């Protein structure tokens, strides 16, 4: 109850939930407000059911609670929700202590790597230690303060353990600051001891006043701007690398104008795909190990590369062998990213940075022959993609491969422009989608490839659908990832959040099987046929039957025309719909790509490994160190 001193007596858990429920943000169109937190995913157990569970029940109207089937999966869903909202809205996740908490660790790492906001609220052991050791408690005989939640410390942008209710007065504002900061953005963990969750305190009423959260955009410093301008004005063959920061900074229109005004072609990272429409004349497509020949050819001949909002991970840089000859310019909100690989750094928001550069560059343009070559390379690659994705008739015993399946999925849409959102994370598919998926809208390509986490696909897609219920969300997933985590099919049915799931069954870990052999290894322990087996052999898995058991509609198909027909049924369905098709584990899109460093044994009795080692050492000579 309230008292005359302007306070209200609440438990720690009640205060936490009430604070989160009061936070607001402007809607994407700028015409209204929406809750910063779209809800809380919860799997209750001892450690959060009595304290936080009661608080969530009290505020269930303004802060919905969603029940999931796996803690890691529900955190993936929360992360997918935030990514679909370009980090402008987010979700919280709560678990019990012990395995419920540690199940969140993989998702915490995924959010950390990808710079995506999620608020993790794992239950913790008793601060009082009266029942010590409580069920599921880890006992550290060297440090009595340690619980399993300490494992979140290196995986969180901000970590706190709330041992007094009043600590929320400082911990929660800090948490929100990190979650909404463009440079620090990532997972926040507040470990919540179960006895402290139920303790009461007289909180100031002002703490719970509705607050509009704003997002900062940093302009470039004058000296860094001038340094970058000096490099660009002397460039004749510049290339833009569009990273995820272009999307998260709402800079796609600014990027388009910059490219057109100055004749600079654009290549995209996995996180940046969709920054420029697929059919734009200056759109070279995917860059790097999973890149198009257009983007990689131009990267090899660029004299200046402008990386905008990119982490410059090894798949983008070809393990630092791609565009090694170019002067690198890093435009980034994060100082650690901006300083990478001896690049000239400009610490800046993507939109403000590009706008400032364009204003100062005035009439400067790339060499006309360079721009013309970029247009030609881009057009040739679009024609190649069209040929790959429109191959329909595949005679037995040949099986379709991922590229042909991608084409069938995209052709099944009658919407123009296509508004589908594709979701993927691991295996061969991210490479094929990076090259071949066509999107004209930011966010239409949702591939988690910073952590490349098997099992993210279906769970992450659920979060995307919660964020974008009006869009068709299509999960493309291999059989290996599907088997790792599929439980949120049931959640999608329960929440009436329809997904279309396309399972490409190549009977094993086809991507790693190819990598194994590329490194000189023998096929071993990746494909089901190459694994140690008992008398019954490898299982014959019916993915459609499995999905039906979780409440979805599902079918198996045998050809590309059958897949296209099934996709029409899936689009018309009223619930989650799974389609499974057998695919070739060996065929991939041969066009494009570049070297990727995977260490090969220096000593081996196998001639194939010895040869692979020689090729590896030769390729290392092209790295920029």
Image: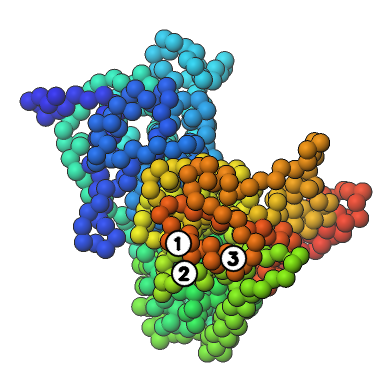
Dot 3 falls on a residue whose secondary structure is helix
Image coordinates of residue 278 in percent, x first then y, are 49, 74
Check if mark 1's residue and mark 3's residue have beta carbons within 8 Å: no
Seen from the viewer's position, the closer of residues 257 and 569 is 569
Q: Is residue 57 left or right of residue 135?
A: left
Q: Which of marks 2 and 3 is nearer the N terminus?
A: 2
- Asked if residue 492 shows in the view, the reply is yes
Mark with earlier residue (1, 3)? 3
Quarter of the image where the C terminus is located:
bottom right
User: Is disc 1 surrounded by few (<14), some (14 to 19) or many (20+) residues within 10 Å?
Assistant: some
**Residue wearing tag 3:** 562
Residue sitting farthest toward the left: 4
Provide the secondary structure element on which disc 2 rests.
loop
Which residue bears the numbered disc 2? Answer: 413
**Label number found at residue 571:** 1
Q: Are marks 1 and 2 in contact (CB under 8 Å)?
A: yes
Q: Is residue 47 above or below residue 465?
A: above
Residue at left offset 48%, top offset 59%:
570
Q: How far apart are marks 1 and 2 (CA)?
A: 8 Å
């Amino acid at each position: 109850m309230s008292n005359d001193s302007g306070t209200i007596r609440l438990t720690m858990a009640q205060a936490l939930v009430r604070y989160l429920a009061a936070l607001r943000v402007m809607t994407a169109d700028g015409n209204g407000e929406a809750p910063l937190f779209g809800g809380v995913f919860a799997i209750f157990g001892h450690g959060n059911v009595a304290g936080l569970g009661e608080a969530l029940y009290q505020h269930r109207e303004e802060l919905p609670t969603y029940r999931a089937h796996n803690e890691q999966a529900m955190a993936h869903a929360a992360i997918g929700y935030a990514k679909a909202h370009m980090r402008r809205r987010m979700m919280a996740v709560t678990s019990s202590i012990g395995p419920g908490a540690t199940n969140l660790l993989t998702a915490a790492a995924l959010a950390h790597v990808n710079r995506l906001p999620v608020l993790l609220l794992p239950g913790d052991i008793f601060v009082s230690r009266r029942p010590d050791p409580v069920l599921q408690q880890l006992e550290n005989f060297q440090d009595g303060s340690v619980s399993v939640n300490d494992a979140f410390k290196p995986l969180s942008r901000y970590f706190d353990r709330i041992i007094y209710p009043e600590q929320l007065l400082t911990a929660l504002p800090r948490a929100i600051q990190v979650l909404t900061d463009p440079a620090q953005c990532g997972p926040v963990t507040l470990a919540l001891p179960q006895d402290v969750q139920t303790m009461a305190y007289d909180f100031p009423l002002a703490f719970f006043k509705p607050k509009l959260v704003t997002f900062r955009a940093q302009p470039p410093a004058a000296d860094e701007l001038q340094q970058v301008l000096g490099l660009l004005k002397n460039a004749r063959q510049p290339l833009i690398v569009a990273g995820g920061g272009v999307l998260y900074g709402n800079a796609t229109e600014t990027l388009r104008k910059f490219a057109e005004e100055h004749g600079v072609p654009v290549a995209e990272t996995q996180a940046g795909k969709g920054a420029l429409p697929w059919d734009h004349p200056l759109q070279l497509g995917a860059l790097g190990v999973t890149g198009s020949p257009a983007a990689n050819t131009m990267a090899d001949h660029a004299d200046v590369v402008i990386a905008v909002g990119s982490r410059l991970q090894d798949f983008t840089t070809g393990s630092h062998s791609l565009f090694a000859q170019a002067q690198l310019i890093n435009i980034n909100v994060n100082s650690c990213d901006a300083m990478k690989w001896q690049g000239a750094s400009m610490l800046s928001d993507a939109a403000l940075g590009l706008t400032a550069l364009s204003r100062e560059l005035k009439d400067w343009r790339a060499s006309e022959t360079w721009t013309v070559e970029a247009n030609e390379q881009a057009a040739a690659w679009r024609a190649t993609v069209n040929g790959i994705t429109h191959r329909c008739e595949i005679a037995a015993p040949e099986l379709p491969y991922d590229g042909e399946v991608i084409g069938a999925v995209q052709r099944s849409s009658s919407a123009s422009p296509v508004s589908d959102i594709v979701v993927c994370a691991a295996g061969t598919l991210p490479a094929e989608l990076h090259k071949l998926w066509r999107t004209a809208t930011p966010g239409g390509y949702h591939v988690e490839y910073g952590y490349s986490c098997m099992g993210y696909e279906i769970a992450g897609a659920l979060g995307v659908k919660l964020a974008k219920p009006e869009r068709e969300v299509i999960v493309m997933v291999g059989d290996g990832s599907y088997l790792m985590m599929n439980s949120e099919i049931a959640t999608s049915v329960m929440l009436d959040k329809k997904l279309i799931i396309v399972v490409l069954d190549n009977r094993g870990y086809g991507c790693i099987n190819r990598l194994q052999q590329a490194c000189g290894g023998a096929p071993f322990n990746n494909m089901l046929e190459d694994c140690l087996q008992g008398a019954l052999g490898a299982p014959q898995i019916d993915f459609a039957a499995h999905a039906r058991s979780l409440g979805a509609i599902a079918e198996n198909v045998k050809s590309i025309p059958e897949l296209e027909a099934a996709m029409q049924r899936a689009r018309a369905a009223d619930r989650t719909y799974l389609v499974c098709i057998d695919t070739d584990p060996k065929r991939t899109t041969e066009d494009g790509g570049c070297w990727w460093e995977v260490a090969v044994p220096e000593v081996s009795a196998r001639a194939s490994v010895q040869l692979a080692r020689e090729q590896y050492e030769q390729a290392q000579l092209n790295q920029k160190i």
